[in-house]
Amino acid sequence: MQDQEFWHQKWAENQIGFHLPDVNPLLKMFWQKLGSSRQDNVLVPLCGKSEDLIWLAQQHDEVIGVELSQIAVRSFFAEHFYTPLVTTLNGLHELYQFDEISIYAGDFFSAPLSQYSRIYDRAALVALSPELRVEYAERIKSLLAPQGKILLITLDYPQQEMQGPPYSVASSEIESLFAGYTVTCLQRDEADANHPRIQKGLSRFAEETWLIES
């Protein structure tokens, strides 16, 4: 997978502006739209040390994250005073487990994952360059169980005005990546003049929340 060195460096230098210190309000607002039960297992790709994992673990018995950076994974457990069981798998991944939460440390594309009835993507698709987004979407679709659902959060802005990541992913690309699935835009939140991205020079910036159903 490309871009790995980029992300390792970001975590090593603690340049993690993408990390939210609190649970994402969009997750709280829209998760019920997926009609989930405690028994639905949840996959969180490229999870970093997200607080969203804690919130999801309050709703579900099994929450599985995948994160490239061991710094991020170890920070997640340390910051919550959790002592995980750590298992070395194939020499490429380590599995960290504590109660409902398991995190695979290593490359998402080769992690030994099964199938999941719910997938939550806040900052994974938008973190990937265009050529990797196709590969990522194929991987996600292969991991989604029959009748499974995805909550996806993306960004939409003029790509030529800012270098990603996070990248802009147009609605047409999402519909293309998930062709054959039911794709519903739950919300488009258009930034106003006070938004930091607009103040830094973007002509427009929006956050979009999607429900994708197999």
Image (tube, helix red, strand yellow):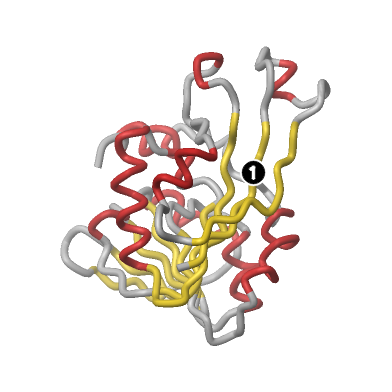
Q: Residue at x 55, y 14 (%)?
A: 161
In the image, 191: left or right of 116? Answer: right
The image quadrant of residue 112 is bottom left
Q: Residue at x 62, y 67 (%)?
A: 54
Amino acid type at circle 1 is Glu
| Viewer-closest of 117 and 87 | 117
Q: Percent position (x, y) of residue 162?
A: 54, 18
Q: Residue at x 75, y 60 (%)?
A: 29
Q: Residues within 10 Å of mark 1 (few under 14, many from 20)?
A: many
Q: Percent position (x, y) of residue 176?
A: 41, 45
Q: Secondary structure at mark 1?
A: strand
Among all residues in the image, which is located at the extreme front? 180
Q: Which residue is mark 1?
A: 208
Q: Percent position (x, y) of residue 120?
A: 53, 61
Question: Does residue 28 appear in this view?
Answer: yes
The image quadrant of residue 141 is bottom left
In the image, 68: left or right of 101? Answer: left
Instruction: Locate the C terminus by quadrant.
Output: bottom left
Report the number of numbered marks. 1
In the image, 168: left or right of 141? Answer: right
Among all residues in the image, which is located at the extreme bottom? 39
Question: Does residue 83 appear in this view?
Answer: no
Instruction: Locate the N terminus by quadrant.
Output: top left
The image quadrant of residue 130 is top left
Among all residues in the image, which is located at the extreme left? 91
Q: Residue at x 67, y 48 (%)?
A: 21
| Viewer-closest of 16 and 213 | 213
